[in-house]
Amino acid sequence: MKKLAILAIAALVLVGCDNPQNTVNTLNKEITQFRAAPNDQTQMVIEQSFAKLDLQITELEKKGKTTEAANLRSQEATLRSDYAAAKIAKTVHDATNAIHGIGNALKEAGQSIGDVFREPTNSTE
């Protein structure tokens, strides 16, 4: 909850810094970066950018610029969809790595167990 409040305050400060289309362009770049190298820091930056864009669109709606706001809402929806797809791809990638890790661990355990039951090659009789 505290994180969300900080994001909202940061977004409020940044709302006046540039126009919403710049925020859309920035989000495109951030999502592309996240897709290429997903990490928590990029994810937080993306969430901040979405909060900023949402505030910018709300301001446009308050000013009666409904056409521009609707266009940006549409772009925002597309970006959120792209971001969701990137997060799903990250989850699938993480799950695949986990499964490979488990498989390797089982393989090593099987080899160790096999080694225990093998007869020693150098027996002294």
Image: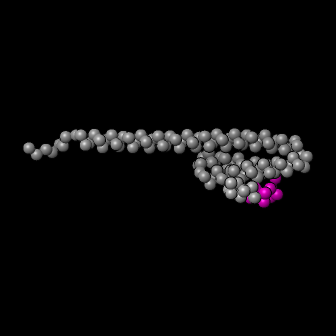
Residue occupying the far left of the picture: 125
Magenta stretch encompasses residue 98? no
Q: Position of residue 71 (x, y in %)?
A: 82, 41
The number of discs equals: 0
Magenta stretch encompasses residue 18? yes
Q: Which residues are magenta?
A: 10-19
Left or right: 42 with respect to 75? left
Residue located at (64% from left, 39% from top): 85
Left or right: 111 with respect to 14? left
Q: Position of residue 73 (x, y in %)?
A: 79, 42
Residue occupying the far right of the picture: 64
Left or right: 65 with respect to 106? right
Secondary structure mostly taken by the magenta-highlighted segment of the chain? helix
Quadrant in the rendering for residue 123: top left
Left or right: 109 with respect to 72? left
Residue occupying the far front of the picture: 1
Quarter of the image where the C terminus is located:
top left
Is residue 26 in sight in this rendering? no
Residue located at (55% from left, 40% from top): 92
Q: Position of residue 112 (x, y in %)?
A: 30, 43
Check the image and tell me how it is coloured: one colour
Residue located at (91% from left, 46% from top): 64
Q: Position of residue 24 (x, y in %)?
A: 75, 48
Q: Nearer the viewer, residue 79 or 111?
A: 111
Figure check: 1 above or below 90: below
Quadrant in the rendering for residue 79: top right
Quarter of the image where the N terminus is located:
bottom right
Is residue 100 in sight in this rendering? yes
